[in-house]
Image (cartoon, rainbow, N blue to C red):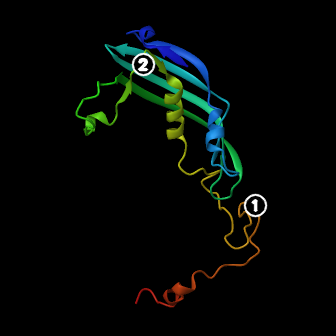
């Protein structure tokens, strides 16, 4: 969705729309195993306004995503809803002296340099930041057996108990509490 900068009022304006993010499946789903599958559309609630040349956005997105558990490799669905705040300021004129060092106050800023704001990349960025770093179907997921590969959530391991690393055998003979 694109919003012309001249149409952004000084009093907050609220809109609701659906944003297509299915292109993320093509970008991040190139291999046979991917961590996440994205829904075709996200529901977006967005409030935007301006103060002088600075633009402010407060929004919320929600949708149902699919993940591949990093422990047991099973697919699972989960709902994700996240609020976000963005502030955009006009892009500063490039100095003739070249690259400049950013100070601490500049790190949280985003810039705009066109007459319309495309909010789609901003929303996609917020979606990527909201995803879990490691997809898990459940906190209690036991994963796969390292020996036989059986899913320990649904079956019992048939390869027997592992004795562990043989290099650590000497530590198993130590007596604790003397």
Classify mark 1: helix, strand or loop: loop
8, above or below 161, in the image? above
- 26 or 75, which is in the foreground? 26
- In the picture provided, is 19 more to the left or to the right than 74? left
Q: Where in the figure is residue 121, as x and y percent of width and height? A: 51, 29
Residue drawn at point x = 65 percent, y = 35 percent: 64
- 165 or 98, which is in the foreground? 98
Q: CA distance from mark 1 to mark 2?
A: 55 Å
Dot 1 surroundings within 10 Å: few (below 14), some, or many (20 or more)?
few
Query: Of the numbered discs in the image, which one, if any, rests on residue 2?
Result: none
Which residue, given by chain and number where applicable, does mark 2 sit on?
A: 114
Which residue, given by chain and number where applicable, does mark 1 sit on?
A: 154
Where the C terminus falls, by quadrant? bottom left
Where the N terminus falls, by quadrant? top right
109, above or below 45, in the image? below
Residue drawn at point x = 68 percent, y = 52 percent: 33
In which quarter of the view is residue 10 placed?
A: top left
């Amino acid at each position: 969705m694109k919003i012309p900068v001249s149409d952004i009022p000084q009093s907050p304006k609220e809109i609701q729309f659906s944003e297509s993010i299915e292109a993320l499946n093509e970008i991040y789903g190139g291999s046979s195993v991917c961590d996440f599958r994205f829904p075709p559309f996200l529901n977006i609630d967005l409030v935007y306004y301006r103060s002088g040349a600075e633009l402010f956005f407060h929004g919320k997105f929600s949708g149902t995503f699919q993940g591949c558990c990093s422990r047991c490799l099973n697919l699972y669905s989960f709902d994700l809803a996240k609020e976000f705040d963005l502030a955009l300021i006009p892009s500063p004129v490039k100095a003739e002296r070249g690259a400049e060092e950013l100070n601490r106050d500049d790190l949280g800023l985003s810039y705009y340099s066109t007459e319309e704001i495309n909010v789609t990349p901003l929303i996609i960025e917020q979606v990527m930041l909201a995803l879990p770093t490691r997809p898990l179907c459940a906190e209690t997921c036991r994963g796969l057996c390292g020996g036989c590969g059986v899913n320990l959530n649904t079956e019992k391991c048939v390869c027997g108990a592992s004795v562990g690393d043989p290099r650590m055998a000497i530590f198993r003979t130590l007596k604790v509490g003397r």
